[in-house]
Amino acid sequence: MGKTVGLAGAGSIAFGTAAVLHEGGHDPMLWSPSGAGTADLAAGAPLTATGAIEVTLTPRVADSAATLARDNDILLIALPGYGHKTVLDSLAPHIEPRHHVIISSHASLGAVYLMQRLAERGVTVPITAWGTTICTGRRQSGTEVMVNTVRSRVDLCTVPEDRLTSALALCETLFGDRFQPRDGLLAISLSNLNPQNHMGIALGNITRMERGETWSQGQNVTPKVGRLLEQLDLERLAIAKALELDVKTIFEHFHLSFHVPIASISEMNQQMHAQGNGGTGPATADSRYVTEDVPYGLVLTVTLGQLAGCPAPLHEAGIRIFSAMYGRDFEQENEILKTLDLSRFDLGDVKQAAKTGILMQADNTGHGPR
């Protein structure tokens, strides 16, 4: 029997995920926080997915966070990281113990933020964090999405960690056998390669984005851009090692996500382009590659590096360069990290929160929370 799944979001990932769910026999509902993203669907128009999935569906549409929570047992957050705090704040008053929350993909310890909001009401639910999205694609219009690929492997974890087995079973029921459990939220945070990859791609192609050109993303991961991505990956892997975490490499990521043989990152992207699934790069500088991935991705990686005593100079340089380009202080735009204020905690506190979902400081004697 199919599951009822409420998706918070109405962009390319939400549309694509709805199509994947429908194809699997489940019943998705879409909620656009502004209402604009689902206006055509709310008026009765069908949603058409093409590319890796060819399907037409008529998804249910929610008019509010309360409706989304009321009418679904599973709530899936599927919008850019800069929208997570607003959506989590909207959903938190309506989440009940019967719910299971999935964050696709997890950004900046959002699961901890939500768990603490729910704890204020005395509510505990399993919150599953994905290291990436179930699919990639582009929204073509208010009723169309081009799905570039459905990933064969997605990293996940759940808080509290003792709910992992049931969470894994649920995700497999919804999307099939494609999930790899990881050791807590820090591993999931460092398993999301989009921030580092999008940083290198955007830096190498910013004028194409700014001019609104149509360009192949895979083809333009040239040898020098590819080498930058590989060097960024080494920084991420060093932080993971310092935290004693097991995460996939960038080579494994492209191999598992896009089904190409392992080679240099540029060569793998050229193969993706040749196969027709290299994707189209952003046609605007106002792209989540920067506005989401810099504050909610690069900033988190740098923060974890600082906690682990493992600096990430290339990631730090990316934040500063994009801030200079855009005339914005991207480091200050991460509303979740600003609210959590990790400067009040040490690495042990953060590691514990990655398992439980709750940030607590040890007392001065080290004998427990205070």
Image (spheres, helix red, strand yellow):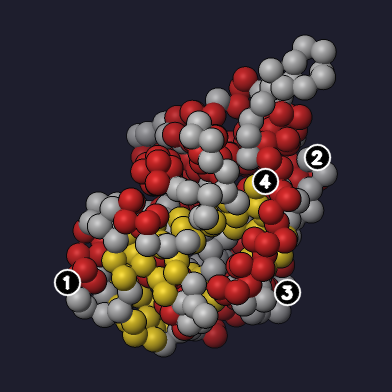
Q: Residue 242 in the image: state x and y as whole percent.
A: 80, 40
User: Which label was assigned to residue 131?
Assistant: none
**Most foreground residue, 50 or 356:** 356
User: Which label was assigned to residue 160?
Assistant: 4
Of pointers 4 and 1, the one earlier in the residue sequence: 1
Residue 356 visible here: yes
Of pointers 3 and 1, the one earlier in the residue sequence: 1
Q: Residue 348 in the image: state x and y as whole percent.
A: 76, 29
Few, some or many residues within 10 Å of mark 4 (<14, 14–19, 20+): many
- Mark 4: amino acid: Pro
Location of residue 366 with respect to 328 vertically, above or below = above
Corner quadrant of residue 37: bottom left
Could you tell me which secondary element the residue under label 2 belongs to? helix
- Mark 1: amino acid: Ala
Q: Residue at x 31, y 70 (%)?
A: 60
Of pointers 3 and 2, the one earlier in the residue sequence: 2
For residue 110, side relative to residue 235 (left or right): left
**Most foreground residue, 214 or 224:** 214
**Most foreground residue, 44 or 148:** 44
Could you tell me which secondary element the residue under label 1 belongs to? loop
According to the image, label 1 marks what residue?
43
Give the residue at the far bottom of this rendering: 54
User: Which label was assigned to residue 242?
Assistant: 2
Tag in front: 3 or 2: 2
Give the residue at the far top of this rendering: 364
Tag in front: 3 or 1: 1
Tag in front: 3 or 4: 4
Q: CA distance from mark 3 to mark 4?
A: 35 Å
Q: CA distance from mark 4 to mark 2?
A: 23 Å
Look at the numbered discs 1 and 2 and tell me whether their residues touch, using CB distance below 8 Å: no
Q: CA distance from mark 3 to mark 1?
A: 46 Å
Q: CA distance from mark 3 to mark 2?
A: 26 Å
